[in-house]
């Protein structure tokens, strides 16, 4: 989603720094880009519809500017075009903004009545107008920002320059992340730490309703009343800059192939012996476990629900964060809410988390990005060690989440004695061997490429399954549709004949997995039903099934706690090779953003 970079320096030309930052933020997903700087008293703004490289073509290579702000926009208010792209300038004020100004219609009317006119359809231009209005009225930037915070509803991370000020960038933050990086004679602003890592690892985190004044040698941060705040400086501890694609054509393929390592790394502290399981949080005091997340992270939650209910007798519910935040949540102190997020910045997940905290109930999180907003807000956080996930389609983050949640369920089973110790020891052994278990599946690329050749020209694909296999069908279907743009749906296998089966025609591809011997026969019967209606079927299973009416992809027989980690690999790779055959922009699918920071 939108990305922000800002820089002010007395020693460096800030233009390459802004461009580097925007390039690093590209993975978040965007549709236009812009940059502005002040040089010799003149404000210059360059904006393009399209990519950062297109923006670079608009910028003269010979400028040596010392103050500037830049942005990648993922359209919310107004079409994808140059006019709606950021920065927006109104009067004396130029801003870039992440988030949504919810009361912008009302503010726009008010400003129009005061004589303001606007060029774009963007809510950001209204925010710039409001700031300009207060700045003209009070002739004081502190009062301007404090008033802005009072009057504006919604979410914002704003970087602001005043036309005649070549020394200071101002920042304001609510419900959208913003950090301030620092080094000698140069300071930086960014929506994401990676954007500035090439230049500094030291940064401050801005919290909601705080604002800051940043010059090349000074950073001052204030609360919404204007009281100066002393902030702790953070030092980035993660792996260095976002890695490159290495030998792979796409980040997505690289990230799929890395899963044999990232899963192991994530669960490593908890699987060496049975006592290691006790390092994980104790869930025994809770009567219900709620799991809240979006998209793929929610699908990881479905796996956890299944394992908790089936193997530990603990009631668990899974919610989409966007729904959870507006519904009755039936919370009490016997409920633990688990939040799952790769980016740690998903707006709906963060809002749902704040809601649970307001109800004074316990929260635990599974998060990939350290020090992200969700990670900082949670009572307790367990980090996945997937490393930076660049492809918009989540793969290695998903399997790390699933693995960590599975080990958490296993630890709960140990504490509640719902699984025999002997069996637990065996499952831990399997987890320790996950790399070698996954390798053959990851290497079988020819099988997936051949299946991709059969489906890439189809317009609809279906995924079915029961129990855990239904949760996997949902994730398989999401992977295919988000990167290949083929319409696909996931259904509980038993539900097909209640409506969806009417969509099955000759050669419609139907994928399924059957990895639970208690219900496999039922799923296979459902597969037969669609085969009778002409469907072209593929089955992922750990059973020895010979049936010429569908193609089987065999996975190793392992415990139920590991099965999802195996089943998902063919689904991910079939989606990848299908999108590749269609020449899709696999790492940056249309309309999608890596980090969904607006509602
Ligand atoms: O960063 P998060 O895990 O909170 O993101 C949640 C979803 O936006 C994300 O999983 C999305 O569904 C992916 N594009 C799926 O591949």
Image (cartoon, rainbow, N blue to C red):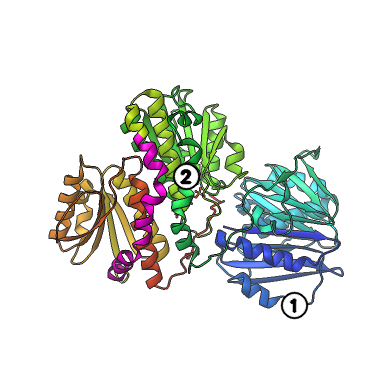
Q: Is residue 383 above or below residue 163?
A: above
Q: Would you identify the image quadrant in which residue 162 lies?
A: bottom right
Q: What element does badge 2 sit on?
A: helix
**Left or right: 509 as drawn, with respect to 222:** left
Q: Is residue 62 visible?
A: yes
Mark 1 Cβ and ligand 1 under 8 Å apart: no
Asked whether 480 or 324 is in front, the reply is 480
Depth order, front residue of 276/197: 276
Question: Where residue 45 sits: x, y (%)?
Answer: 73, 69
| Marks 1 and 2, how far apart at CA | 43 Å
Would residue 389 be found to the left or right of residue 202 on screen?
A: left
Residue 226 placement: quadrant: top right
> Which is in the foreground here, disc 1 or disc 2?
1
Task: Please state, as top left, top right, bottom left or bottom right, where the N terminus lies in the image.
Answer: bottom right
The range drawn in magenta is 426-455
Residue 294 appears in the picture as rendered: no
Question: Residue at position x 39%, y 37% from top?
Answer: 428
Q: Is residue 48 above or below residue 409?
A: below
Q: Judging from the image, what secondary structure is the residue with disc 1 in?
A: loop
Q: Residue at x 49, y 59 (%)?
A: 392
- 581 above or below 8? below
Mark before the other along the chain sequence, 1 or 2: 1
Look at mark 2 in the image and give the residue it sits on.
Answer: 322
The dominant secondary structure in magenta is: helix
- Percent coordinates x, y for residue 375 in the rendering: 58, 40
Task: State the mark number for residue 60.
Answer: 1
**Residue 439 falls within the magenta-colored stretch:** yes
- Depth check: 309 or 160 in front? 309
Lateral position of residue 251 relative to residue 303, left or right: right
x and y, in percent, of residue 566 in the image: 35, 50
């Amino acid at each position: 989603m939108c990305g922000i970079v800002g820089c002010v320096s007395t020693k460096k030309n800030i233009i390459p720094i802004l461009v580097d930052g925007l390039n690093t933020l590209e993975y978040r997903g965007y549709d236009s880009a812009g940059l502005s700087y002040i040089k010799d008293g003149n404000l210059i703004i360059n904006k393009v519809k399209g990519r950062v490289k297109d923006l670079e073509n608009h910028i003269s290579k010979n400028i040596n500017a010392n103050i500037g702000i830049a942005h990648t926009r993922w359209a919310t208010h107004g079409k994808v075009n140059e006019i709606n792209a950021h920065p927006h300038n109104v009067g004396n004020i130029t801003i870039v903004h992440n988030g949504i100004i919810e009361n912008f219609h009302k503010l726009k009317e008010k400003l129009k009545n005061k004589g303001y006119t606007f060029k774009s359809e963007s809510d950001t231009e209204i925010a710039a107008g409001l700031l300009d209005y207060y700045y003209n009225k009070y002739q004081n930037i502190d009062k301007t920002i404090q008033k802005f915070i009072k009057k504006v509803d919604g979410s914002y991370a704003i970087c602001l320059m005043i036309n005649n000020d070549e020394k200071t960038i101002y920042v304001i933050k609510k419900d959208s992340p913003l950090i301030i990086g620092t080094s000698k004679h140069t300071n930086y602003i960014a929506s994401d730490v990676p954007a500035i890592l090439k230049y500094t690892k030291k940064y401050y985190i801005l919290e909601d309703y705080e604002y800051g004044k940043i010059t090349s040698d000074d950073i001052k941060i204030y609360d919404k009343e204007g009281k100066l705040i002393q902030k702790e400086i953070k030092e980035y501890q993660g792996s260095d800059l976002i890695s490159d694609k290495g030998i792979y054509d796409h980040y997505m393929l690289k990230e799929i192939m890395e899963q044999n390592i990232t899963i192991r790394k994530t669960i490593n502290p908890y699987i060496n012996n049975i006592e290691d399981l006790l390092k994980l949080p104790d869930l025994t005091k809770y009567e219900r476990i709620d799991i809240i997340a979006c998209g793929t992270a929610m699908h990881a939650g479905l796996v956890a629900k299944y394992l908790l209910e089936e193997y530990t007798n603990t009631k668990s519910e899974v919610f989409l964060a966007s729904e959870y935040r507006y519904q009755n949540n039936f919370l009490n102190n016997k409920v633990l809410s688990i939040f799952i997020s790769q980016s740690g910045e998903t707006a709906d997940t963060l809002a749902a988390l704040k809601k649970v905290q307001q109800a004074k109930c316990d929260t635990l999180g599974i998060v990939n990005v350290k020090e992200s907003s969700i990670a900082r807000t949670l009572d307790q956080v367990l980090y996945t060690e997937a490393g930076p996930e660049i492809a918009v389609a989540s793969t290695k983050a998903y399997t790390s989440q699933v693995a960590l949640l599975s080990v958490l369920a296993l630890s709960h089973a140990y504490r509640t004695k719902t699984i025999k110790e002997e069996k637990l020891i065996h499952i831990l052994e399997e987890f320790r061997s996950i790399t070698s278990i996954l390798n053959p599946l990851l290497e079988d690329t020819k099988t997936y490429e051949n299946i991709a050749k059969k489906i890439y020209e189809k317009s609809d694909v279906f995924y079915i399954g029961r129990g855990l296999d239904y949760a996997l069908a949902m994730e398989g279907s999401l992977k295919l549709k988000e990167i290949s743009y083929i319409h696909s749906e996931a259904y509980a296998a038993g539900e097909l004949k209640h409506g969806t089966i009417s969509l099955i025609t000759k050669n419609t591809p139907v994928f399924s997995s059957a990895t639970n011997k208690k219900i496999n026969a039922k799923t296979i019967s459902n597969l037969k039903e669609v085969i009778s209606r002409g469907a072209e079927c593929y089955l992922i299973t750990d059973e020895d099934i010979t049936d010429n009416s569908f193609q089987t992809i065999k996975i190793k027989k392992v415990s139920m706690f590991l099965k999802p980690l195996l089943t998902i690999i063919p689904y991910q790779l079939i989606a990848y090779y299908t999108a590749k055959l269609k020449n899709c922009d696999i790492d940056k699918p249309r309309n999608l953003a890596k980090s969904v920071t607006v509602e």
